[in-house]
Amino acid sequence: MEKILEVKDLEVSFQTYGGSVKAVRGVSFDLHKGETLAIVGESGSGKSVTSQTIMKLIPMPPGKITGGQILFNGEDIVPKTDKQMQKIRGKEISMIFQDPMTSLNPTMKVGYQIMEVLIKHQNMSKQAAKARAIELLSLVGIPMPERRVNQYPHEFSGGMRQRVMIAIALAANPKLLIADEPTTALDVTIQAQILDLMKDLQSKMDTSIIFITHDLGVVANVADRVAVMYAGQIVEMGTVDEIFYDPRHPYTWGLLASMPSLDNDDKAELAAIPGTPPDLTNPPKGDAFAARNNYALAIDFEEEPPMYQISETHFAKTWLLHPDAPKVEPPDAVKKRMRQLSSAFKQPVLVKEGN
Amino acid sequence: MVKYIGKRLLYMLISLWLIVTATFFFMRIAPGNPFTSEKKLPPEIEANLNAHFGLDQPWYAQYWDYLVRILNWDFGPSFKYKSQTVNDIINEGFPVSAMLGAEALLLAVAFGVLLGIIAALKHNRWPDYTAMIIAVLGISVPSFIMATFLQYFLAIKMGLFPVARWETFMHTILPALALAATPMAFIARLTRSSMLEVLSNDYIKTAKAKGLSQGVITVKHAIRNALLPVVTYMGPLTAGILTGSFVIENIFGIPGLGAHFVTSINNRDYTVIMGVTVFYSILLLVSILLVDIAYGFIDPRIKLAGGKKGE
């Protein structure tokens, strides 16, 4: 399949008064055409920064790409100027944000906010753009689009506004859509509607999606592949099945164990991952997760773990996959769902030395 | 909308009545009267004067009389300037003050908003610091010092403008500059802080993610949202600046309305005090109404009460 995006060893840091915060520390992944990649992780894990860096939307300064490449359609966008980026943003790559209540300009008609993209990227006249905006509104399931197009955002509900955001994002048929927690601010029934809408539009338009979330339930619903981020690094990546049924990284175990599930009996308490993420101004020596990890080995505090490959598509960054590592049992909640997947290699293969 | 304005006009009349009443009585409480001067008047003459201006009537008669006159837009004769009525004074002074004020207002808004936007866009870089130094100077340097400096350097040393008097357009520039300095600085600071707030909003990021340039984002998405605080400040500013400034008009020898606000009180010139106060209040109330109407146009979320059907 055609690769639309390739991120290689991306490093992003922010200059602050307290020193430089290394928000993204060597992230690599790729994305195929029409595929949905979910990036999960807790707050501050660098998932939003990673995605905003792909559009170069992080404020620079204080933000800075300190290393790596972002190949979009085979072209590195890291050295591109803001002017060149303007031709990519909204046209090739577009973005949906977390809070639909604040993401639309309150003093501009909804229709015009969609038309802007069309006028800018498709050289449409105002009339043509307006007609297309009405089409887009009805495409994202907004009733009476002819009337709605002339209304202001405050006349829309939260779910409706997120639909408008989707219409804006998809107006110019982008090849890549980045959705930064698009359903977090919505209530559950609306969440499901928005997810269905996104899946539906994706199959119509053949867009690739990067879906950022901390909700594993959403991941299972939309993603083809999942990348788990922790402290600015991808610690495990694989297909949805691999992550849910054969997770290898203790952090992924922790995330899965903390997810409520219908098979849980009422007595079992939901597990939580103890502690807080490390300060990325001075990332800890060794594995960043070691201090919170019940399965931490002595070497985790000394040396950063390398990346191991478990199958063609499954990678995990943990010393537990080292041939000499002791055999450990994942937590019960995770063990219950574990399955032997046919795709897995006999032995994990070392792919990359820790740096 | 019509209903809303009607309602507001009614409230304005009530406010105006309260202002007139308060001024009327406070003025009478103040010691002295229009005929108090260094040389004591013979009692018969004072009694005659009082009778002539109706001051011998009981207070309720005077008050009623005054209310009726104001309704007819007649502010009565001045006590001090024998040949002039208060209407004459306002009719002569206001056009001059208003002309000067309008020029100053234009300068203040244009440069204030511009400076504020530049400062916000170049936040924490040299244009920001420069604009804010100008703003701090504008706020902290009193207008009479600013006026004297302008006169000394631009008029006397460089000879670019006339020093004083009110004759040609060139005469209006220096006083307008001096008058505009403080409000301009204030508007610059207001615009800057409100622009900074707006620029950190999510919808600015959305606009950026659409591929719009910084210029388009500023003009189409940011300015309109950042302008509300400035518009709020415009209400009182407009009324204040159009009715003239005692200090600036004195320094430049301009025959405006500003001087009467101060001298009439020293003179206990009852009718002039009342006249300019009522006049100023009307201007203030009207400009506040205009500001409120402008809100509705700038921000569609602000619905003017009574503007909706079925209310």
Image (cartoon, rainbow, N blue to C red):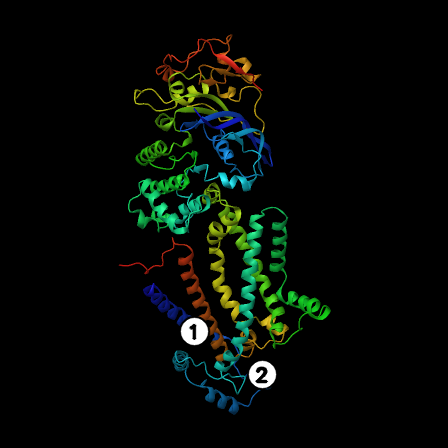
| A43, A26: nearer the viewer | A26
**Residues marked 2 and 1, same chain:** yes
Density class for disc 2 (Cα within 10 Å; few <14, some 14-19, many ≥20) is few
Chain ID for label 2?
A: B
Badge 2 amino acid: Ser
- Residue B60, compared with residue A130, is above or below; it is below
Task: Please give the name of the residue rendered at 43% of the width and 73% of the height, measured from the top-left corner.
Answer: B20
Disc 1 residue crowd, few under 14, some 14–19, many 20+, Cα 10 Å: many
Q: Circle 1 — which element?
A: helix
At a point 63% along the width and 69% down the height, the residue shown is B174
From the top left corner, tell me how far across and down residue B224 is, in percent: 47, 54
Q: Which residue is mark 1?
A: B20
Image quarter in which the N terminus of chain B is found: bottom left
- Residue A255, percent across and down? 41, 23
Mark 2 highlights which residue?
A: B37
Q: Is residue B10 visible?
A: yes
